[in-house]
Image (cartoon, grey):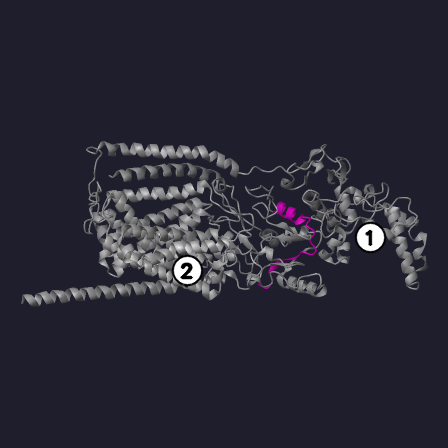
Amino acid sequence: MTDRLTALKTTLWTLVGILAAVTAVRFTWGLGSVTHLSDAAPWGLWIGFDVMSGVALAAGGFVLAATVYIFGLERYRPFVRPAVLTALLGYAAVAVGLLYDLGLPWRIWHPVLHWQHRSVLFEVAMCVMLYLTVLALEFAPTVLEHPRLSGRFFRGALKTLKKATIPLVITGIVLSTLHQSSLGSLFLITPYRLHPLWYSHIIYLLYFVSAVGLGLMMVTLESLLSAWFMGHQAHRRELSGLGLAASVVLWIYLALRLGDLAMRGVLGMALDGSRQADLFLLEITVSAVAPATLLLFRRVRSSLGGLALCSVLTVSGMILYRLDTSILAFARPEGFAYFPSWEEFAVSIGIVASFALIFIFFVEHFRVYDDVGKGARPVIRTSHDPATLFGLQPSVRAAPRRYSAAALAGMTVALVFLPMARKGSIPSPTSPARSVPGQVLVPDSGAGRTLLLATRRLSEDAPATKEQDHLLLLIDGNQNGNAVLFDHDAHIERMGADSSCGTCHHLSLPLDRTAPCSACHRDMYDTTVTFDHRAHEEALGGNAGCAQCHGADAPVKSYESATACMECHAADAASSSIIDPPRDRWLAAVSYEDAMHGLCVKCHEREKEKSPDRYASYLAECRNCHDPDLRARLQALEPAKSSQVEPQAGTQRRARRVP
Amino acid sequence: MSRVPAILVDTTRCTGCEACVLACKEENHLGEDRLRPGQETVDGLSSTRFTTILRRPGEHFVKQQCRHCLDPACVSACLVGAMQKSPEGPVIYDSELCIGCRYCLVACPYGIPRYEWDESVPYVRKCTLCYPRLTEGKEPACVEACPHEALSFGSREALLAEAHRRLASAPQRYVQHVYGEHEVGGTSVLYLADVSLGFLGWSDHLSDEPLPLLSWASLKKVPPVIVGMGTLMGGIHWVIRRRMQLAARAAEEATGGEDD
């Protein structure tokens, strides 16, 4: 075991420890406690990286299987097993990542039973599940070859699986083709949310071709890494061949991508200097242009450094492509940016780390890297050697302790940071302003946070004296700190039941839901007509007329910004009024007498003059209003009398809802 | 599809009193709103707010809610069929099937479905057009609550006729367009307005094509890909193996010939 490998494993175990801590929090308190996901960013790093990129990174499995088993290019056989193992573990990592991301992960099996064939995601889910099975069967011979598994059953299974290799490989290729492309098809349904530089009607083709190129480069990178960490020789000549193939595939990808953009006429957007344009240029350069060009040179292809550079470029660039489509180029409402939380990174990295450890386990215990190639010399200790702890070197025996310590350290560090992160993420319920009996309603100090101006039904706590069923509210009607009992039901009945709410509630604002009492009750002794907002609105031409009363520049069209009635209706006030026509907009209506004499009398006189034969002669006479019968009718409108009317069922229902 | 229940929202009549929001909250037992981190106000939809009033400059109030598309993207996106287009018309949600993938949130062209991010057992929440009430023969709670007749409930055809009648009778009052008549294949919540309602969707220019058709264009290629790719790979394998066998036999014969 090399020192590099020990260091790598220690690091990986630390990351797994961090993952463990975050995992506990994720599954105890839910997605909101560890992620920055929101309704504006429903998919984040776990989908963009773990799922989208994870599947793409595992594409090497089917590409290499096709190369060797279908096209018969035997010299690439050494890469098949590691590529299949990577694919198997990659897909397993995708499944594990999904368990973190799904809101209800224990239902991950639902697609098996509940089919919905119009869903692209259903196709992806089925393909991934089936392909995971195929990969397990493709890789199984490697495990079954182990000398410990020499029983008849295992030998029989091994024989059967080896016979089934070709059908398995073909199934794997078909399934991969389907879901590698379908991951792109997922975004076909979002033409209005995905930026035009990424949205394409052939996005499935782009995803498939890029996955093939990425798969080839991923196998290259992995082979270089394992050579470096495990200390064996890399297969230079074959790697060079893979590089050339990748270059060809990447050029095809580039032609398709740019050609599609040109066909749709949005190629110009790539140069418009916007954030998305820069992102696009960066992505396309790193993922395809640079590596595809470099790999054309034999010198780059045949040097390990050159290959490493190109594979790192392609791998990171193609991951960026997946992240772009699923996160970065996805439209969100303004002010809803998404950047993953450190916990999201910790989970993504932790999953990769744990599967890297599993990969190393397989490499150490099974014949994953064949020494078929020239000079390849695996220094792997325990291949085909069921070793016991006895006879191992002390450094090897110390390993479990070292790794446990690393994992525990990681977990501890994460736990130290976690509660703080949680505190910031779990919202505390905001306290809306409430009115309670005997207390004045005070709006919450955080004005924007006051949600519903909830008033409570008084009779629940202290039975109303007059009518048990009447809703009495304690309201601060004029918002001056003095609360009064308010008979809401009586008002509703008097004003005309359900259609009347707007008469008082027409100036609804988050913190000022009703017109103040003084808007109507200018006069102590008589009821007055209230301002009819709807009638004014219709007369002034709908919402376009708002500015006529509220002023065009008023930031909020509220009661405060409204013009006083008398500014327009000055002529309607009685000339003989003993009260100054109010200019204060808080006291909008003139007194009842003034209103009647100003509005009714003048108009009556006008109408009589205009068409004397149409209106009766008494139209402009005092007795028209000042009539004993009419007085009785007006008095019937008083609260004490109207409350004897049976409350309507609908009114009751409403009253509870709209205080 | 003869009598699709629908809501007509006449934004020129809405005064933003939010009686509909309160009625909706009571009907669906939604409780108080909670602010999520980074959220300044609760104006928008949330898992505790299925409908809300968007305030636009110039005293325009626009009711935001699920549009109950005739061919909904969310329904076609859901991989287990938890989002469903009910036979009556409203788009409803079966929480028993949902696995929590949130593809419906991604797919909705109007960005309507909301998720219970802060629950350890979270579900998708959105307006159901008061489906339980409809089955009882009642109109949706928000429509019943509206004091200004800004909301009307009825069959889609009847409301479309009414909308066009209003457009014709007061042409200066409205933008001459019934929002939702054709967008993404038509929706069951229709809007009349005196300003452009582009801000309600993600784009001003929603095409009339239902979004599920876009996915279907790729999904319908699945059977041909299975057959084609399978045959192609099998064929190539057969041809190459045959040629290698022939080459091996030829080499054998050649060496055999030399031996003779």
Task: Check whether the beta carbons of the residues at disc 2 and disc 1 lie within 8 A of each other.
Answer: no
Magenta residue check for A117: no
Q: Which residue is mark 1?
A: A568
Residue situated in front as seen by the camera: A654 or A596: A596
Local packing at callout 2 (Cα closer than 10 Å; few below 14, some 14-19, many 20+) is many
Examine the structure image and report whether residue B22 is included in the region drawn in magenta: yes
Camera-side residue of A296 and A549: A296
Q: Chain of mark 1?
A: A
Amino acid type shown at disc 2: Tyr
Task: Give the labeled residue for mark 2.
Answer: A204
Q: Position of residue B18 (x, y in %)?
A: 67, 48
Q: Which disc number belongs to residue A73?
A: none
Q: Which residues are magenta?
A: B1-27
Instruction: Give the x, y percent position of residue A236.
Output: 24, 53
Query: Between tags 2 and 1, which lies in front?
Result: 1
Picture quadrant of residue A656: top right
